[in-house]
Amino acid sequence: MKTLHTYLTRQVLASLLMTVAVFTFVLLLGNALKEILSFLVNGQATLGLVAQAMVLLIPFVWVFALPMGMLTATLLIFGRFSADQELTAVRASGVSLVSLVSPVLLLSLALCALSALVNMEIAPRCRVAYKNLLANLDVGVANVIIPEGRFIKDFEGYICYVRKNRGGNLQDVMIVRLKDQTNVDQIILAPSGALQFDRETRDVILTLHDSSSVTLSTNGIASPGTGDFTIRASLRPARKGASEPRISDMTIGELWERRRQMEQSINQSARFHGLTPNQLEAATTPYRVQIHEQVSFSFACFGFTLVGIPLGIRVHRRETNIGIAMALILVAVYYSFIMVGQALDTRPEYAPHLIVWLPNFLFQAVGAVLLWRANKGF
């Protein structure tokens, strides 16, 4: 029996590592294409900074990759066991299905503990660090930094193009000044220039030498100009959320403390503003929903395992694509409840903090029934 448990656990662990790695890569790629790679392509970040950002994103994507990986692993392994008649051989040996899968269930509970640590502490902290890193990248854009051969729109009211940038010494510069952020107001061309950055005011100072310019008036008349120009432009504001984390980026301790502070503040001012109990509860419900979501989501691995084992046996297929397709469908069903709870986080009358628990109860109940029925026919 010990040999059989060891063999099954190794198979599940190997498949789990593979599926978690695949889902982590896919989710990282989605976030990287959306936010990180644009800095690298534009020459505004080094490979080291991109790698640091990717590392900070890993705990955040593990929140989703761990449950999805466990579900896919159980579907694949038990589907193959059933298709290869290995489960029939185990049954002939007098071993029950519940006894056979007990180490896999224990593994899923261990993953629940790991998910709780990631969901409640590690992922929120890494997410905040990741956003601060992006904000710092925004601030550092002007210090490198106008990439060669690209049109840059990081400076408010201006579009910049530089053919060569040698440590702030610019060659073949074109500056387009915008009016109302859309209409072209002035075009400046210069064979050379210099770039400086004022960190206190977040201003970029461009000094253009021997430049020629054309200023467009409202009636369409162009006024030429020559000489040296100095342009002082402000960087676009830093990304939102860099200094103050959103509710979804708070740890479990921060959520409890923020909820307590808000309740005290509201209770003190309620007497003066005449707030109703429902209004008071609506103000703190988003924090309650996020707390329950972090805790409930930590049990996803166990529910997915309970469902994945009997479904893998019932499907009786060994193809990887079938297992992954089933896993994606089940994950979509699970997350739909989470999304509903998040959408209703300002409507306390619908008890959104309990809605986020429904997928756990549903998957664990259905999984337990399916496992019991599979054990009877095993």
Image (cartoon, rainbow, N blue to C red):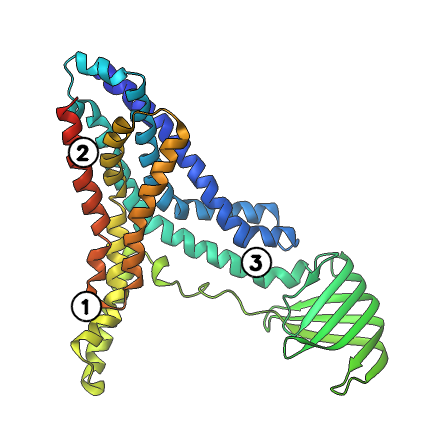
Residue 252 position, x and y percent, is 28, 56
**The quarter of the displayed image where residue 260 is located:** bottom left
Tell me if 346 is positioned left or right of 188 in this view: left
Q: Is residue 8 visible?
A: yes
Q: Nearer the viewer, mark 2 or mark 1?
A: 2
- Where disc 1 sits, the SS reads helix
Residue 132 position, x and y percent, is 48, 59
- Of the numbered discs 2 and 1, the one sitting upstream in the chain is 1
Q: CA distance from mark 3 to mark 1?
A: 42 Å
Tell me if 171 is positioned left or right of 1 in this view: right
Q: Is residue 146 above or below residue 371?
A: below
Residue 330 position, x and y percent, is 31, 42
Do the numbered discs 3 and 1 sit on residues whose CB atoms are within 8 Å?
no
Q: Is residue 256 visible?
A: no
- Of the numbered discs 3 and 1, the one sitting upstream in the chain is 3
Do the numbered discs 2 and 3 sit on residues whose CB atoms are within 8 Å?
no
| Closest to the observer, 201 or 84 | 84
| Closest to the observer, 19 or 251 | 19
The residue pinned by badge 3 equals: 137
- Where disc 2 sits, the SS reads helix
The residue pinned by badge 2 equals: 370
Q: Which residue is found at the position 38% from the left and 63% from the top?
A: 246
The residue pinned by badge 1 equals: 349
| Closest to the observer, 190 or 24 | 24
* Three-letter code for the amino acid on which mark 3 is drawn: Leu
